Amino acid sequence: MTDPVMFTRGFSIGFIALMQMILPPVLSVGMLLLLCHVYGVEFTDFFQVLAMLVAVLSSLLPRGRTNGHTPVLPAALPLALSVLLRWMIIVALLLAIGFATQYSEDFSRRVVFTWIIVTPALLIITTLWLHEVMRRLLNRSAARRVAFVGCTDVSITLADRITQNSRALGLSVQGFFDDRGADRLGSCGNMRRLGMLGDIVAAVQRKQVDAIFVTLPVRQVRRVMDLVEELRDTTVSIYYVPDLLVFDLLQSRMGELLGVPVVSMCETPFYGYGGLVKRVTDVSFALIILLLSAPLLALIALAVKFTSPGPVLFKQRRYGLDGHEILVWKFRTMTVLEDGEQVHQATRTDSRVTPLGRVLRRYSLDELPQLFNVLQGTMSLVGPRPHAIAHNEEYRRLIKGYMVRHKAPPGITGLAQVNGCRGETVRVEDMQARVNYDLEYLRRWSPLLDLKILALTAVRVLKDDQAY
Protein backbone atom coordinates (compact mmCIF):
# COMPACT_ATOMS: atom_id res chain seq x y z
CA MET A 1 0.00 0.00 0.00
CA THR A 2 2.76 2.47 0.86
CA ASP A 3 5.21 1.60 -1.91
CA PRO A 4 3.48 3.81 -4.55
CA VAL A 5 3.33 6.66 -2.03
CA MET A 6 7.04 6.40 -1.27
CA PHE A 7 8.37 6.09 -4.80
CA THR A 8 6.51 9.09 -6.17
CA ARG A 9 8.47 11.46 -3.96
CA GLY A 10 11.80 11.74 -5.68
CA PHE A 11 14.51 10.24 -7.81
CA SER A 12 16.90 9.85 -4.86
CA ILE A 13 14.60 7.55 -2.91
CA GLY A 14 13.90 5.47 -6.00
CA PHE A 15 17.63 5.23 -6.72
CA ILE A 16 18.44 4.01 -3.20
CA ALA A 17 15.64 1.46 -3.44
CA LEU A 18 17.18 0.23 -6.71
CA MET A 19 20.58 -0.03 -5.03
CA GLN A 20 19.03 -2.14 -2.29
CA MET A 21 17.95 -4.58 -4.99
CA ILE A 22 21.09 -4.83 -7.13
CA LEU A 23 23.99 -4.37 -4.67
CA PRO A 24 23.71 -7.77 -2.90
CA PRO A 25 24.33 -9.81 -6.09
CA VAL A 26 26.95 -7.32 -7.34
CA LEU A 27 28.87 -7.40 -4.05
CA SER A 28 28.63 -11.18 -3.69
CA VAL A 29 30.00 -11.84 -7.18
CA GLY A 30 32.52 -9.00 -6.91
CA MET A 31 33.95 -10.42 -3.69
CA LEU A 32 34.34 -13.83 -5.35
CA LEU A 33 36.27 -12.25 -8.25
CA LEU A 34 38.44 -10.21 -5.86
CA LEU A 35 39.39 -13.22 -3.73
CA CYS A 36 40.31 -15.26 -6.81
CA HIS A 37 42.62 -12.40 -7.84
CA VAL A 38 44.12 -11.99 -4.34
CA TYR A 39 44.85 -15.72 -3.96
CA GLY A 40 46.05 -16.08 -7.56
CA VAL A 41 43.34 -18.58 -8.44
CA GLU A 42 42.07 -18.75 -12.03
CA PHE A 43 38.40 -17.74 -12.44
CA THR A 44 37.46 -20.96 -14.24
CA ASP A 45 34.15 -22.06 -15.75
CA PHE A 46 33.24 -23.58 -12.39
CA PHE A 47 33.66 -20.21 -10.68
CA GLN A 48 31.61 -18.56 -13.44
CA VAL A 49 28.74 -20.98 -12.82
CA LEU A 50 29.05 -20.32 -9.08
CA ALA A 51 28.94 -16.57 -9.75
CA MET A 52 25.72 -16.92 -11.75
CA LEU A 53 24.10 -18.98 -8.98
CA VAL A 54 25.22 -16.44 -6.39
CA ALA A 55 23.83 -13.55 -8.44
CA VAL A 56 20.41 -15.18 -8.55
CA LEU A 57 20.31 -16.34 -4.91
CA SER A 58 21.78 -13.20 -3.35
CA SER A 59 19.12 -11.08 -5.05
CA LEU A 60 16.79 -12.62 -2.47
CA LEU A 61 18.55 -10.81 0.37
CA PRO A 62 16.13 -8.48 2.23
CA ARG A 63 15.30 -4.87 1.50
CA GLY A 64 13.32 -2.55 3.74
CA ARG A 65 9.62 -3.01 3.02
CA THR A 66 6.25 -2.94 4.64
CA ASN A 67 3.80 -5.78 5.16
CA GLY A 68 1.09 -3.84 6.96
CA HIS A 69 2.49 -4.54 10.42
CA THR A 70 6.06 -3.27 10.14
CA PRO A 71 7.40 0.04 8.80
CA VAL A 72 9.06 0.50 5.43
CA LEU A 73 12.42 0.65 7.23
CA PRO A 74 12.86 -2.19 9.75
CA ALA A 75 15.14 -1.86 12.79
CA ALA A 76 18.86 -2.31 12.13
CA LEU A 77 19.43 -5.45 14.25
CA PRO A 78 16.57 -7.54 12.77
CA LEU A 79 17.67 -6.42 9.31
CA ALA A 80 21.27 -7.50 9.96
CA LEU A 81 20.15 -10.84 11.39
CA SER A 82 17.88 -11.35 8.39
CA VAL A 83 20.77 -10.73 5.98
CA LEU A 84 22.96 -13.17 7.91
CA LEU A 85 20.25 -15.84 8.02
CA ARG A 86 19.52 -15.61 4.30
CA TRP A 87 23.22 -15.73 3.53
CA MET A 88 23.47 -18.96 5.55
CA ILE A 89 20.57 -20.37 3.53
CA ILE A 90 22.25 -19.38 0.26
CA VAL A 91 25.49 -21.08 1.37
CA ALA A 92 23.55 -24.20 2.39
CA LEU A 93 21.92 -24.30 -1.05
CA LEU A 94 25.26 -23.89 -2.80
CA LEU A 95 26.84 -26.64 -0.68
CA ALA A 96 23.90 -28.93 -1.43
CA ILE A 97 24.26 -28.26 -5.17
CA GLY A 98 28.01 -28.88 -4.96
CA PHE A 99 27.48 -32.15 -3.08
CA ALA A 100 24.80 -33.33 -5.50
CA THR A 101 26.86 -32.52 -8.61
CA GLN A 102 30.19 -33.62 -7.04
CA TYR A 103 31.87 -30.46 -8.37
CA SER A 104 32.87 -29.12 -4.95
CA GLU A 105 36.41 -30.50 -5.38
CA ASP A 106 36.95 -28.23 -8.40
CA PHE A 107 36.98 -25.06 -6.27
CA SER A 108 39.77 -23.51 -4.23
CA ARG A 109 38.81 -24.22 -0.62
CA ARG A 110 40.76 -21.17 0.56
CA VAL A 111 38.84 -18.86 -1.79
CA VAL A 112 35.44 -20.37 -0.99
CA PHE A 113 35.98 -20.43 2.78
CA THR A 114 37.19 -16.80 2.88
CA TRP A 115 34.32 -15.76 0.61
CA ILE A 116 31.71 -17.43 2.86
CA ILE A 117 33.09 -15.62 5.94
CA VAL A 118 33.82 -12.15 4.49
CA THR A 119 30.85 -11.61 2.16
CA PRO A 120 28.06 -11.53 4.81
CA ALA A 121 29.97 -8.88 6.77
CA LEU A 122 30.20 -6.73 3.64
CA LEU A 123 26.51 -7.30 2.84
CA ILE A 124 25.42 -6.37 6.37
CA ILE A 125 27.50 -3.18 6.36
CA THR A 126 26.20 -2.16 2.93
CA THR A 127 22.59 -3.01 3.77
CA LEU A 128 22.67 -1.02 7.00
CA TRP A 129 24.31 1.92 5.24
CA LEU A 130 21.63 2.00 2.54
CA HIS A 131 19.02 1.60 5.29
CA GLU A 132 20.39 4.72 7.02
CA VAL A 133 20.56 6.70 3.75
CA MET A 134 16.94 5.80 3.00
CA ARG A 135 15.90 6.81 6.52
CA ARG A 136 17.51 10.24 6.16
CA LEU A 137 16.00 10.80 2.72
CA LEU A 138 12.54 9.93 4.00
CA ASN A 139 12.93 12.19 7.01
CA ARG A 140 14.12 15.04 4.80
CA SER A 141 11.19 14.71 2.40
CA ALA A 142 7.98 16.54 3.15
CA ALA A 143 5.44 14.10 4.57
CA ARG A 144 2.42 13.41 2.37
CA ARG A 145 -0.82 14.47 4.05
CA VAL A 146 -3.41 11.72 4.19
CA ALA A 147 -7.06 11.71 5.25
CA PHE A 148 -9.65 8.99 5.77
CA VAL A 149 -13.13 8.79 4.33
CA GLY A 150 -15.18 7.34 7.16
CA CYS A 151 -14.41 6.88 10.85
CA THR A 152 -14.37 3.10 11.25
CA ASP A 153 -12.38 0.51 13.17
CA VAL A 154 -10.13 -0.05 10.17
CA SER A 155 -9.47 3.68 9.67
CA ILE A 156 -8.64 4.14 13.37
CA THR A 157 -6.29 1.14 13.29
CA LEU A 158 -4.55 2.23 10.08
CA ALA A 159 -4.27 5.85 11.28
CA ASP A 160 -2.61 4.70 14.51
CA ARG A 161 -0.11 2.55 12.61
CA ILE A 162 0.71 5.34 10.17
CA THR A 163 1.21 7.78 13.06
CA GLN A 164 3.53 5.35 14.88
CA ASN A 165 5.64 4.90 11.73
CA SER A 166 5.14 8.33 10.20
CA ARG A 167 8.85 9.04 9.65
CA ALA A 168 9.57 5.74 7.96
CA LEU A 169 6.45 5.93 5.82
CA GLY A 170 6.66 9.63 5.05
CA LEU A 171 2.95 10.08 5.78
CA SER A 172 1.10 12.46 8.06
CA VAL A 173 -2.49 11.79 9.18
CA GLN A 174 -4.65 14.93 8.91
CA GLY A 175 -8.00 13.51 10.01
CA PHE A 176 -11.22 12.06 8.58
CA PHE A 177 -14.37 13.01 6.69
CA ASP A 178 -17.73 11.56 7.73
CA ASP A 179 -21.40 12.52 7.35
CA ARG A 180 -22.50 11.15 10.72
CA GLY A 181 -23.11 13.39 13.69
CA ALA A 182 -21.00 13.35 16.84
CA ASP A 183 -23.64 11.30 18.69
CA ARG A 184 -23.32 8.45 16.14
CA LEU A 185 -19.59 8.61 15.55
CA GLY A 186 -18.36 7.60 18.97
CA SER A 187 -14.62 7.57 19.58
CA CYS A 188 -12.36 8.11 16.57
CA GLY A 189 -9.05 7.71 18.34
CA ASN A 190 -6.63 10.57 17.84
CA MET A 191 -8.08 11.63 14.48
CA ARG A 192 -9.82 14.96 14.12
CA ARG A 193 -12.86 15.56 11.96
CA LEU A 194 -12.09 17.55 8.80
CA GLY A 195 -15.65 17.86 7.55
CA MET A 196 -18.47 16.07 5.73
CA LEU A 197 -17.98 13.85 2.67
CA GLY A 198 -19.08 16.76 0.49
CA ASP A 199 -16.08 18.80 1.75
CA ILE A 200 -13.45 16.37 0.44
CA VAL A 201 -13.09 17.83 -3.06
CA ALA A 202 -12.64 21.36 -1.72
CA ALA A 203 -10.01 20.18 0.79
CA VAL A 204 -8.10 18.44 -1.98
CA GLN A 205 -8.27 21.48 -4.23
CA ARG A 206 -6.90 23.61 -1.37
CA LYS A 207 -3.92 21.19 -1.21
CA GLN A 208 -4.81 20.16 2.34
CA VAL A 209 -4.78 16.47 1.43
CA ASP A 210 -2.40 14.51 -0.83
CA ALA A 211 -3.86 11.01 -0.44
CA ILE A 212 -7.28 9.64 0.50
CA PHE A 213 -7.93 6.28 2.19
CA VAL A 214 -11.54 5.24 1.68
CA THR A 215 -12.64 3.03 4.59
CA LEU A 216 -16.41 3.03 4.07
CA PRO A 217 -18.12 -0.36 4.51
CA VAL A 218 -18.62 -2.53 1.42
CA ARG A 219 -22.38 -1.98 1.64
CA GLN A 220 -21.74 1.68 0.74
CA VAL A 221 -20.06 0.78 -2.56
CA ARG A 222 -22.33 3.20 -4.48
CA ARG A 223 -21.14 6.09 -2.29
CA VAL A 224 -17.52 5.02 -2.83
CA MET A 225 -18.01 4.99 -6.61
CA ASP A 226 -19.61 8.45 -6.54
CA LEU A 227 -16.73 9.78 -4.43
CA VAL A 228 -14.09 8.40 -6.79
CA GLU A 229 -15.94 10.01 -9.70
CA GLU A 230 -16.00 13.39 -7.92
CA LEU A 231 -12.24 13.20 -7.28
CA ARG A 232 -11.32 12.40 -10.88
CA ASP A 233 -10.84 16.11 -11.54
CA THR A 234 -8.10 16.31 -8.88
CA THR A 235 -4.58 14.88 -8.50
CA VAL A 236 -5.19 13.24 -5.13
CA SER A 237 -4.12 9.60 -4.71
CA ILE A 238 -7.03 7.34 -3.74
CA TYR A 239 -6.83 4.01 -1.93
CA TYR A 240 -9.73 1.78 -0.98
CA VAL A 241 -9.23 -0.11 2.28
CA PRO A 242 -11.73 -2.98 2.68
CA ASP A 243 -12.88 -3.54 6.24
CA LEU A 244 -11.31 -6.95 6.77
CA LEU A 245 -10.86 -6.49 10.51
CA VAL A 246 -14.28 -8.08 10.99
CA PHE A 247 -12.62 -11.38 9.99
CA ASP A 248 -10.01 -13.38 11.87
CA LEU A 249 -7.39 -13.16 9.12
CA LEU A 250 -4.50 -15.58 8.76
CA GLN A 251 -1.64 -14.52 6.46
CA SER A 252 -3.88 -12.04 4.63
CA ARG A 253 -2.41 -10.55 1.45
CA MET A 254 -3.53 -8.99 -1.78
CA GLY A 255 -3.05 -10.71 -5.12
CA GLU A 256 -4.71 -11.42 -8.42
CA LEU A 257 -5.97 -14.46 -10.25
CA LEU A 258 -5.99 -14.12 -14.04
CA GLY A 259 -6.19 -10.36 -13.67
CA VAL A 260 -8.95 -10.41 -11.02
CA PRO A 261 -7.94 -8.91 -7.62
CA VAL A 262 -8.29 -11.33 -4.70
CA VAL A 263 -7.61 -11.07 -0.96
CA SER A 264 -6.41 -14.16 0.89
CA MET A 265 -8.17 -14.44 4.26
CA CYS A 266 -6.78 -17.77 5.49
CA GLU A 267 -3.55 -19.00 3.94
CA THR A 268 -0.32 -20.75 4.85
CA PRO A 269 2.73 -18.49 5.31
CA PHE A 270 4.86 -21.08 3.50
CA TYR A 271 4.10 -20.13 -0.08
CA GLY A 272 6.72 -19.18 -2.65
CA TYR A 273 10.05 -18.08 -1.21
CA GLY A 274 8.85 -18.57 2.38
CA GLY A 275 8.33 -22.26 1.74
CA LEU A 276 11.78 -22.58 0.16
CA VAL A 277 13.45 -20.85 3.12
CA LYS A 278 11.71 -23.10 5.63
CA ARG A 279 12.48 -26.30 3.72
CA VAL A 280 16.17 -25.46 3.27
CA THR A 281 16.44 -24.54 6.95
CA ASP A 282 14.72 -27.78 7.99
CA VAL A 283 16.93 -30.04 5.87
CA SER A 284 20.16 -28.25 6.83
CA PHE A 285 19.53 -28.28 10.58
CA ALA A 286 18.04 -31.80 10.57
CA LEU A 287 21.13 -33.22 8.82
CA ILE A 288 23.47 -31.45 11.24
CA ILE A 289 21.54 -32.66 14.31
CA LEU A 290 21.35 -36.22 12.96
CA LEU A 291 25.10 -36.32 12.28
CA LEU A 292 25.91 -35.00 15.75
CA SER A 293 23.43 -37.26 17.53
CA ALA A 294 24.02 -40.48 15.54
CA PRO A 295 25.90 -42.25 18.41
CA LEU A 296 23.15 -41.23 20.84
CA LEU A 297 20.44 -42.51 18.50
CA ALA A 298 22.19 -45.88 18.26
CA LEU A 299 22.55 -46.13 22.06
CA ILE A 300 18.87 -45.26 22.63
CA ALA A 301 17.76 -47.79 20.01
CA LEU A 302 19.77 -50.55 21.70
CA ALA A 303 18.51 -49.55 25.14
CA VAL A 304 14.86 -49.61 24.01
CA LYS A 305 15.39 -53.00 22.34
CA PHE A 306 16.91 -54.72 25.38
CA THR A 307 14.98 -53.13 28.26
CA SER A 308 11.40 -53.98 27.24
CA PRO A 309 9.63 -56.18 24.69
CA GLY A 310 8.38 -54.55 21.50
CA PRO A 311 9.69 -52.60 18.51
CA VAL A 312 12.32 -49.88 18.85
CA LEU A 313 10.24 -47.33 16.95
CA PHE A 314 6.62 -46.42 17.57
CA LYS A 315 4.66 -45.21 14.53
CA GLN A 316 1.39 -43.31 14.89
CA ARG A 317 -1.01 -41.81 12.34
CA ARG A 318 -1.40 -38.07 12.68
CA TYR A 319 -2.55 -35.13 10.55
CA GLY A 320 0.09 -33.24 8.60
CA LEU A 321 0.01 -30.22 6.29
CA ASP A 322 -3.52 -29.45 5.04
CA GLY A 323 -4.89 -32.31 7.14
CA HIS A 324 -3.25 -35.10 5.12
CA GLU A 325 -2.54 -38.24 7.12
CA ILE A 326 1.13 -38.93 7.93
CA LEU A 327 3.09 -41.46 10.01
CA VAL A 328 5.09 -39.91 12.84
CA TRP A 329 8.04 -41.85 14.28
CA LYS A 330 9.19 -41.90 17.91
CA PHE A 331 11.30 -44.15 20.10
CA ARG A 332 8.91 -46.49 21.90
CA THR A 333 8.46 -45.36 25.50
CA MET A 334 5.37 -47.39 26.46
CA THR A 335 4.33 -51.01 26.75
CA VAL A 336 1.41 -50.33 24.38
CA LEU A 337 1.20 -49.09 20.77
CA GLU A 338 -2.08 -47.15 20.61
CA ASP A 339 -3.20 -45.86 17.22
CA GLY A 340 -6.91 -46.49 16.99
CA GLU A 341 -10.16 -44.62 17.50
CA GLN A 342 -9.24 -44.10 21.16
CA VAL A 343 -5.78 -42.94 22.24
CA HIS A 344 -5.25 -42.27 25.94
CA GLN A 345 -2.90 -39.40 26.74
CA ALA A 346 0.08 -40.13 28.97
CA THR A 347 -0.31 -39.01 32.58
CA ARG A 348 2.40 -38.06 35.08
CA THR A 349 2.24 -41.46 36.83
CA ASP A 350 1.24 -43.54 33.81
CA SER A 351 2.01 -47.22 34.39
CA ARG A 352 2.26 -47.80 30.62
CA VAL A 353 5.49 -45.79 30.44
CA THR A 354 8.64 -47.89 30.79
CA PRO A 355 11.46 -46.79 33.16
CA LEU A 356 13.69 -45.94 30.18
CA GLY A 357 10.73 -44.31 28.43
CA ARG A 358 10.23 -41.99 31.38
CA VAL A 359 13.77 -40.67 30.98
CA LEU A 360 13.43 -40.34 27.20
CA ARG A 361 10.14 -38.46 27.54
CA ARG A 362 11.48 -36.20 30.28
CA TYR A 363 14.21 -34.86 27.96
CA SER A 364 12.21 -35.27 24.70
CA LEU A 365 14.78 -37.76 23.38
CA ASP A 366 11.95 -39.98 22.16
CA GLU A 367 11.21 -37.33 19.53
CA LEU A 368 14.61 -37.61 17.80
CA PRO A 369 13.43 -40.07 15.09
CA GLN A 370 11.11 -37.31 13.87
CA LEU A 371 14.20 -35.76 12.30
CA PHE A 372 13.71 -38.39 9.60
CA ASN A 373 10.13 -37.14 9.23
CA VAL A 374 11.64 -33.69 8.64
CA LEU A 375 13.99 -35.00 5.94
CA GLN A 376 11.06 -36.88 4.40
CA GLY A 377 9.11 -33.61 4.22
CA THR A 378 6.13 -34.70 6.32
CA MET A 379 7.23 -32.59 9.30
CA SER A 380 9.22 -29.46 10.07
CA LEU A 381 11.60 -28.63 12.90
CA VAL A 382 9.20 -25.91 14.09
CA GLY A 383 5.43 -25.87 13.75
CA PRO A 384 2.23 -26.91 15.50
CA ARG A 385 2.75 -30.26 17.24
CA PRO A 386 0.83 -33.06 15.48
CA HIS A 387 -1.78 -34.84 17.57
CA ALA A 388 -3.07 -38.37 17.25
CA ILE A 389 -5.93 -38.61 14.74
CA ALA A 390 -8.30 -39.66 17.52
CA HIS A 391 -7.49 -36.45 19.42
CA ASN A 392 -7.87 -34.34 16.28
CA GLU A 393 -11.34 -35.72 15.64
CA GLU A 394 -12.28 -35.05 19.27
CA TYR A 395 -11.03 -31.48 19.54
CA ARG A 396 -12.06 -30.27 16.08
CA ARG A 397 -15.66 -30.53 17.33
CA LEU A 398 -14.89 -28.67 20.57
CA ILE A 399 -12.54 -25.85 19.49
CA LYS A 400 -13.41 -23.35 16.78
CA GLY A 401 -10.68 -23.04 14.17
CA TYR A 402 -8.84 -26.11 15.45
CA MET A 403 -8.09 -27.48 11.96
CA VAL A 404 -6.60 -24.17 10.76
CA ARG A 405 -3.40 -25.11 12.63
CA HIS A 406 -2.81 -27.65 9.86
CA LYS A 407 -2.05 -24.82 7.40
CA ALA A 408 1.56 -25.34 8.52
CA PRO A 409 3.61 -28.56 8.45
CA PRO A 410 3.63 -30.09 11.95
CA GLY A 411 6.78 -29.50 13.97
CA ILE A 412 8.99 -31.32 16.44
CA THR A 413 8.67 -28.22 18.60
CA GLY A 414 6.52 -25.10 18.38
CA LEU A 415 5.50 -21.78 19.86
CA ALA A 416 3.02 -23.52 22.18
CA GLN A 417 5.67 -25.85 23.58
CA VAL A 418 8.20 -23.12 24.44
CA ASN A 419 5.38 -21.26 26.20
CA GLY A 420 4.67 -24.15 28.56
CA CYS A 421 1.84 -25.90 26.67
CA ARG A 422 3.12 -29.45 26.97
CA GLY A 423 2.02 -32.66 28.59
CA GLU A 424 -1.51 -33.83 29.25
CA THR A 425 -4.47 -31.66 28.22
CA VAL A 426 -6.87 -32.35 31.06
CA ARG A 427 -9.32 -29.60 30.10
CA VAL A 428 -10.53 -28.29 26.76
CA GLU A 429 -9.03 -24.93 27.83
CA ASP A 430 -5.57 -26.56 27.86
CA MET A 431 -5.91 -27.56 24.21
CA GLN A 432 -7.45 -24.17 23.38
CA ALA A 433 -4.27 -22.50 24.69
CA ARG A 434 -2.15 -24.68 22.41
CA VAL A 435 -4.30 -23.86 19.41
CA ASN A 436 -4.09 -20.14 20.18
CA TYR A 437 -0.30 -20.30 20.15
CA ASP A 438 -0.32 -22.36 16.94
CA LEU A 439 -2.46 -19.78 15.15
CA GLU A 440 -0.28 -16.99 16.50
CA TYR A 441 2.73 -18.81 15.02
CA LEU A 442 1.02 -18.89 11.62
CA ARG A 443 0.32 -15.14 11.81
CA ARG A 444 3.84 -14.17 12.92
CA TRP A 445 6.01 -16.74 11.12
CA SER A 446 9.46 -15.73 9.99
CA PRO A 447 12.80 -17.60 9.77
CA LEU A 448 13.98 -15.62 12.80
CA LEU A 449 10.97 -16.78 14.82
CA ASP A 450 11.85 -20.40 13.98
CA LEU A 451 15.43 -19.87 15.18
CA LYS A 452 14.17 -18.27 18.40
CA ILE A 453 11.82 -21.20 19.08
CA LEU A 454 14.64 -23.72 18.46
CA ALA A 455 16.89 -21.85 20.91
CA LEU A 456 14.16 -21.68 23.56
CA THR A 457 13.43 -25.38 23.05
CA ALA A 458 17.05 -26.28 23.83
CA VAL A 459 16.77 -24.35 27.10
CA ARG A 460 13.33 -25.66 28.06
CA VAL A 461 14.25 -29.32 27.53
CA LEU A 462 16.57 -29.15 30.54
CA LYS A 463 14.08 -27.62 32.98
CA ASP A 464 10.57 -28.41 31.71
CA ASP A 465 8.55 -30.44 34.21
CA GLN A 466 5.56 -30.75 31.86
CA ALA A 467 7.20 -33.50 29.77
CA TYR A 468 6.27 -36.96 31.08
Image (spheres, helix red, strand yellow):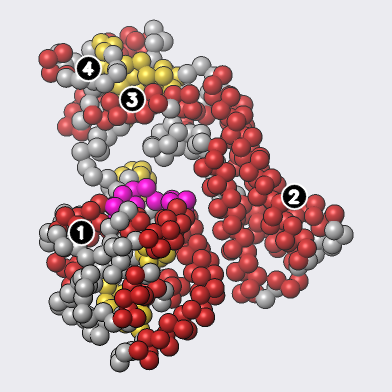
Query: What residue is shown with label 2?
Result: 30
Query: What residue is shown with label 3?
Result: 159
**Is 358 in front, or is 373?**
358
For marks 4 and 2, give the CA distance.
56 Å
Q: Is mark 1 on a helix, strand or loop?
A: helix
Q: Type of residue at label 2?
A: Gly
Q: Type of residue at label 3?
A: Ala
Q: Is mark 3 on a helix, strand or loop?
A: helix
Q: Where 245 falls versus 97 (above or below)?
A: above
Q: Nearer the viewer, mark 4 or mark 2?
A: 2
**Is 214 in front, or is 120?**
120
Could you tell which of marks 3 and 2 lies nearer the N-terminus? Answer: 2
Magenta stretch encompasses residue 428: no
Does the image show residue 409? no
Mark 2 near mark 1, Cβ–Cβ under 8 Å? no
Could you tell which of marks 4 and 2 lies nearer the N-terminus? Answer: 2
Name the residue located 59 percent from the left edge and 57 percent from the top edge. 88
- Tell me residue 211's x, y (percent): 39, 21
For marks 3 and 1, give the CA distance.
36 Å
**Is 435 in front, or is 269?**
435
For marks 2 and 1, give the CA distance.
53 Å
- Tell me residue 62's x, y (percent): 55, 45
Name the residue located 76 percent from the left edge and 66 percent from the top edge. 109
- The span shown in magenta is 437-450
